[in-house]
Amino acid sequence: MATVLRKLPDLSTEAHWRQFWTSVGDDTLIVSGRTRSGGYPLQPERLSVRAVWGGRAEYSVGGNRLVIDDDCYQVVNPGSEGALRIQSAQDLEWLSVHYSATTAAAALTRFSGSAEDWLDGRAPATPSMPRFAEHLRPHDRLVTPALIALARQVEQGAVPDPAQCEERALAVLERLGRMHGEERTHILELAQVRLRTKREIHRRIWAATDFLLSSYDRPLTLQQLADVACLAKYHFLRMFVAVHGLTPMEFLRCKRVAVASRLLRSTSLSLVEIAHIVGVADRSTLLRLFVEYCDLTPEEYRRRPRVAGEVRPSPTWLNELLTARARSDAEESRVAALPAVVASSEASVGM
């Protein structure tokens, strides 16, 4: 049975977290509620997934600082050491699910397998827990709906129903396994010959992407991102496009537009203030960016009729922007390549 809490527990000292996890035992822990502050120092984690809406939370894992906000969720492997810090001017909605080893193993071993197994499609000789990449993940149509459904389940009634909450948490876990499989396929599709190289490129590009997603509100350069990935600048650019389907600066603009969209819908801040918050030079730059990416001016977007109950844009809005821009870039590349293709075809048939 799951242990369900509507506020973050006090894990400020080693004694506190040892006592707390002893009380939880082998249960799956679900924490969902509203808060302005909270967190805990570096400590070992269970397999966990976390998301936040209406604010930002800083999470450190593996020496990396990640900012979790409305656009992304994060998965952490069992045994990793993480630290959490929430300090917000307004209430934000927090969700984290911490799975017991028994539950995680039962649900995820079918998604396991070695790197060589991935290539051959073989079942692993010894089933084991898959290792998730611990980077930020833009909200998607696979895992995110299950996360939102779980958060809403916890909100229902004076006392959450542990059985129903656990059922929702298991649905999240199953979708995490499917997401892991899709990511594995994406890695295999990279152009590098050696599997180890594919995995290392994917890891480095996502390290730079995490930095971008966590630092979008300040000036960023291609060289800075390449340095985070420990790659030469132009090699980094090619590999980033191979992994994401668009350039780092396009990715950064999508993130800034997504954040600006939320602020336009949920606050009365001026365009000058929003431009400053999202790291854009000035009001006119934000205006041009918004028209290019959304086909609307910021004022038109703010005045657009809302869906009943809507406070902020869809949680998958960043993902939708990224997908649309990647599709647009691919189409532009295809059209640009047509003259060369036609010329080659004509030459081959003697035209």
Image (spheres, grey):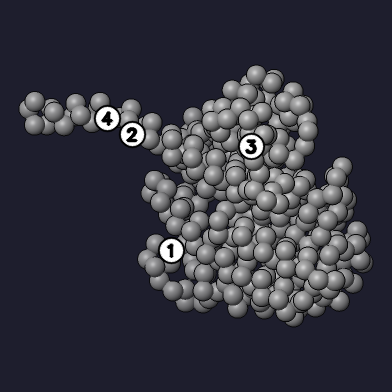
Tell me whether circle 4 and circle 2 mark residues in contact (CB < 8 Å): yes
Q: Secondary structure at mark 1?
A: helix
Query: What residue do we see at 42% from left, 54% from top?
Result: 188
> Disc 1 marks which residue?
118
> Disc 3 marks which residue?
304
- For the residue marked with disc 2, what is the amino acid? Arg
- For the residue marked with disc 1, what is the amino acid? Trp
> Disc 4 marks which residue?
338
Closer to viewer: mark 1 or mark 3? 3
- For the residue marked with disc 4, what is the amino acid? Leu
4 sits to left or right of 227: right
Tell me whether circle 2 and circle 1 mark residues in contact (CB < 8 Å): no
* Mark 3–mark 4 distance (CA, rounded to whole Å): 39 Å
* Residue 283 higher or lower than 175, as above or below: above
Badge 2 or badge 1: first in the primary sequence: 1
Query: What residue do we see at 66% from left, 28% from top?
Result: 299
* Mark 1–mark 3 distance (CA, rounded to whole Å): 47 Å
Depth order, front residue of 275/225: 275
Tell me whether circle 2 and circle 3 mark residues in contact (CB < 8 Å): no
* Mark 4–mark 2 distance (CA, rounded to whole Å): 6 Å
